[in-house]
Image (cartoon, grey):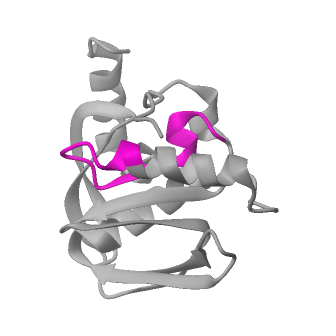
Amino acid sequence: MTVREIRLFGDPVLKTVSDPIGEIDDRVRALVDDLLDSVKVPGRAGVAASQIGVNLRAFSYNVDGEVGYILNPVLVEVSGEPELIDEGCLSVPDLWFKTSRYPFARARGLDLDGNEIEVSGTGVLAQALQHETDHLDGLLYLDRLDKPTRREAMKQVRESSWF
């Protein structure tokens, strides 16, 4: 159980589609422990396995005091009119851009016992479900920006102290 280092923009694992989890073994249990420890750091709403360098479909979330995880998540429903909302990412520190997200999202996946679970919500939880699922599909929120905003974002990334 460890708070793991977050991989930053430019790390190839962030642009790689994550592999599905097959057998739920001790390695997967340890991954979930690390994801939960890593998301409990103040200011974090979600951490995808790829953000801690593990190419498996899993993420944790921490929204409004609700902390959880989901294995092999699939975004099964989004609804409402997409809204431009401020979004940031631990893998792109200190940068925030208006990103189009649906106000409601529902994800299905598994828990550590192999039972099907469902997580759904509005607001920040809906945003986190969409954002973390994107990570597992090899996408960063920067990929969802319109061209002029993405151009500005990339300029700011190149000028950042961490890049």
Vertically, is 65 above or below 25? below
What x and y, as percent, mark residue 61? Answer: 37, 61
- Numbered circles on residues, count: 0
What x and y, as percent, mark residue 33? Answer: 50, 50
Q: Is residue 1 left or right of residue 40?
A: right
Vertically, is 116 above or below 58? below
Q: Is residue 101 left or right of residue 21?
A: left
Q: Is residue 33 left or right of residue 21?
A: left
Tell me what residue is drawn at x 61 percent, y 39 percent. 15
Quarter location, residue 123:
bottom left
Magenta segment boundaries in residue numbering? 37-54
The answer to whether residue 138 of the structure is visible from this angle is no
| Of 17 and 61, the residue lying toward us | 61
Tell me what residue is drawn at x 26 percent, y 42 percent. 41
What x and y, as percent, mark residue 94? Answer: 21, 31
| Of 18 and 98, the residue lying toward us | 18
| Of 82 and 62, the residue lying toward us | 62
Tell me what residue is drawn at x 29 percent, y 84 percent. 81
On whether residue 46 falls in the magenta region, the answer is yes
Tell me what residue is drawn at x 65 percent, y 83 percent. 115
The answer to whether residue 80 of the structure is visible from this angle is yes
Residue at the outermost right position: 23
Quarter location, residue 89:
top left
Q: Quadrant of the C terminus?
A: top left
